[in-house]
């Protein structure tokens, strides 16, 4: 009975969202949930996000151990727009991963075969461009070979687009696989709630939408969601910008996006949600343009 009620609620919300009018002056919000596949906790959060019925896009880390679970979730929910979260870093103490190509790309890893935790340490190892291209291609190939409909690529921690020569590789691979690139469709970053205090995240998100702190273009809201459980609480970011009690921050982002207050704003038409699949169809891959200004 409970499952039936949830399904009915999702159908009802989707009907409301479909009924929203696409006008030239619509205010669009594109929610991009990053790091799916990183852990079971991020995948559990992905399922909860799907249960809201909200249109959103998710970027999957196909180098990480839990990506196969993500694939199963997304195959059961083809309405979710899927991206490849191109990954060249592994930033968590006690939870590291390495390249799909392993020892074939030694300039991308430390002596233990793991990706470096930061962009700085990655650059200091003088990574070879041909190895970067080979590894990023392998990640896209793994994604495509799962059978998922993959719409776009983006970049974990910004490393894959941190230099012009890296961006050229990403652009080449996106063209080869007919994929969009996040931030190449005129998206403007909405104010971030990433570093907002845990207890203030929901109010901050509501303020962003209800008080028009987003512009009349497509506003990109990059979100990092996860369940605050023992798995996530054990992770410590090796980067200086890493947040203390990171798992609580990720849970709070999920709670804000799935809150009744945010769902009500969407229902009222305060903002129209759009996915990368829809944005690519609306804009056209041929009209992608690099106006790179952030991660």
Image: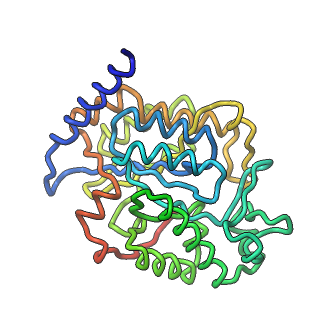
Residue at image location 53% in from the left, 47% down from the top = 70
Q: Position of residue 256 (x, y in %)?
A: 45, 33
Residue at image location 35% in from the left, 76% down from the top = 289
With 149 as the anchor, is 228 left or right in this view? right
With 98 as the anchor, is 211 left or right in this view? left
Residue at image location 53% in from the left, 80% down from the top = 169
Residue at image location 19% in from the left, 51% down from the top = 26
Q: Quadrant of residue 102?
A: bottom right
Q: Is 131 drawn above or below residue 275 in the view shown?
A: below
What colour scheme governs how the chains and residues are painted in the rendered image of this protein?
Answer: rainbow
**Which of these two is toward me, 212 or 153?**
153
How many numbered circles are shown? 0
**Which of these two is toward me, 113 or 245?**
113
Q: Is 128 drawn above or below residue 3 in the view shown?
A: below
Q: Position of residue 125 (x, y in %)?
A: 78, 76
Q: Position of residue 152 (x, y in %)?
A: 42, 64
Q: Position of residue 122 (x, y in %)?
A: 72, 71
Which part of the image, by quadrant, shows the N terminus?
top left
**Which of these two is toward me, 62 or 244?**
62
Q: Quadrant of residue 151?
A: bottom left
């Amino acid at each position: 009975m409970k499952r039936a009620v949830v399904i009915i609620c999702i159908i009802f919300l989707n009907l409301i969202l479909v009924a929203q009018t696409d006008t030239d002056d619509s205010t669009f919000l594109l929610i991009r949930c990053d790091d799916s596949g990183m852990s079971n906790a991020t995948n559990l959060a992905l399922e909860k996000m799907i249960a809201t019925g909200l249109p959103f896009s998710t970027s999957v880390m196909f180098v990480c151990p839990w990506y196969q679970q993500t694939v199963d979730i997304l195959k059961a929910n083809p309405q979710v727009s899927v991206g490849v979260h191109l990954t060249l870093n592994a930033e968590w103490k006690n939870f590291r991963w390495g390249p799909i190509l392993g020892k074939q790309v030694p300039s991308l890893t430390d002596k233990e075969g793991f990706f470096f935790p930061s962009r700085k340490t990655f650059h200091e190892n003088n990574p070879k461009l041909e190895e970067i291209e080979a590894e990023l291609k392998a990640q896209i190939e793994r994604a495509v070979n799962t059978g998922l409909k993959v719409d776009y690529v983006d970049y974990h921690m910004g490393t894959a687009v941190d230099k012009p020569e890296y961006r050229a590789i990403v652009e080449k691979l996106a063209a080869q696989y007919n994929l969009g690139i996040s931030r190449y469709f005129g998206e403007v970053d909405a104010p971030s709630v990433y570093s907002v205090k845990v207890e203030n995240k929901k109010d901050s998100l509501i303020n962003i939408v209800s008080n028009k702190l987003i512009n009349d273009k497509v506003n990109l809201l990059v979100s990092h969601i996860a369940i605050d459980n023992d798995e996530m609480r054990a992770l410590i970011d090796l980067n200086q910008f890493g947040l203390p009690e990171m798992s609580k921050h990720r849970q709070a982002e999920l709670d804000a996006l799935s809150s009744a207050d945010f769902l009500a704003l969407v229902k009222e038409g305060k903002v129209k949600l759009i996915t990368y699949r829809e944005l690519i169809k609306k804009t056209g891959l041929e009209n992608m343009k690099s106006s790179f200004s952030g991660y």
